[in-house]
Image (cartoon, helix red, strand yellow):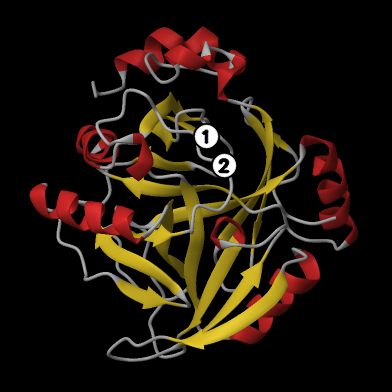
Amino acid sequence: MQLHGIHHLTAVSADARGNHDFYTRVLGMRLVKKTVNQDDTSAYHLFYADGEASPGSDITFFDWPVGPERRGTHSVTRTGLRVSGEDSLKFWAARLAEQGVKAQPIREIDGRLQLDFEDPEGQRLALVDDGGRGDSHPWSRSPVDAAQQIRGLGPITMSVPDLRRSDAFATDVMNMRRARTYRTDDARPVDVQVYEMGEGGPAAELHMRVEPGLSPAQPGAGGVHHVAFRVPDAEYGAWVDRFNSLRLRSSGPVDRYYFRSLYVREPGGILYEIATDGPGFDADEPKDRLGESLSLPPFLEPQRASIERGLKPL
């Protein structure tokens, strides 16, 4: 029993309209689900993904009226967005510059070329050359040509002050594999432990930076709420049983309607989610109309009128 890779990453925005503009117009991603936070229906939950809303391709945002994140350890520090080839990275370097987005020079990190940048709220992102590995599902209505579009997520980079407990949780509880280590070439170099899931590769990697000297991060806009890992629908119950047998303090089974979830906080303080591939975002709207109107799971439909009144237009 193992995780199959990154399922999604959920971050925080305090500007839903600007967030929507950046991820759809600048990055060319598809808004595949416009819904609300099921635990706080005053907030949008926006999902951006590839053309087919494939598991592993979506970065999502809660829209909360909060100040900016104070950066530090105990947090996800950068989200990889996969593209294919050095030419794609050169295209993106030019596109980001044209859009007024500051980016770092293309450089090699852990044997792959990548381009680091931030969204307007300081969300740390990286375009990573995945070598064309795996399938791609371009969106026909994207402002970005199909060959250059973002193919999915990964790797995800996080920061912990002490590797030992987070490492044990990743390997002994989450069944990740230690793959390799590398040292960054930052102004203050740090050691990074890489973990693999499933078939490996950037879509199935978690990178842990070891930074004992940093203060803990404080949540806010531009920060990450949680990272989710993929499991086949048929294996979800086994993961619930596993967490129960280990007596972990978890959420227990949660049905998000579009997928089923199971949440647990790892020892470094970062929230992990296990999420199923199905049923999928076309559970309540046609695939060619995804994200065009407000979607609500059945248990929230009776509240639709009041929920819609409380949301700002995108």
Residue type beneath disc 1: Asp
| Residue on which disc 2 sits | 135
Give the labeled residue for mark 1: 39
Residue plotted at (50% across, 62% down)? 155
Residue 23 placement: quadrant: top left
Q: Residue at x 48, y 58 (%)?
A: 130
Would you place residue 1 above or below residue 19 in this image? below
Looking at the rendered structure, the number of numbered marks drawn on it comes to 2
Element under label 2?
Answer: loop
**Which residue is pictured at 25% across the width and 23% down the height?**
312
Quadrant for the N terminus in the image: bottom right
* Residue 196 located left or right of residue 308: right
Residue 219 shown left or right of residue 58 in the figure:
left
Query: Which quadrant is the C terminus positioned in?
Result: top left
In this rendering, the answer to whether 276 lies above or below 303 is below
Q: Quadrant of residue 277?
A: top right
Q: Check disc 1: other Cα within 10 Å, few if <14, some if 14-19, many if 20+.
A: few
Q: Nearer the viewer, residue 268 or 185?
A: 185
Say what amino acid the circle numbered 2 marks.
Asp
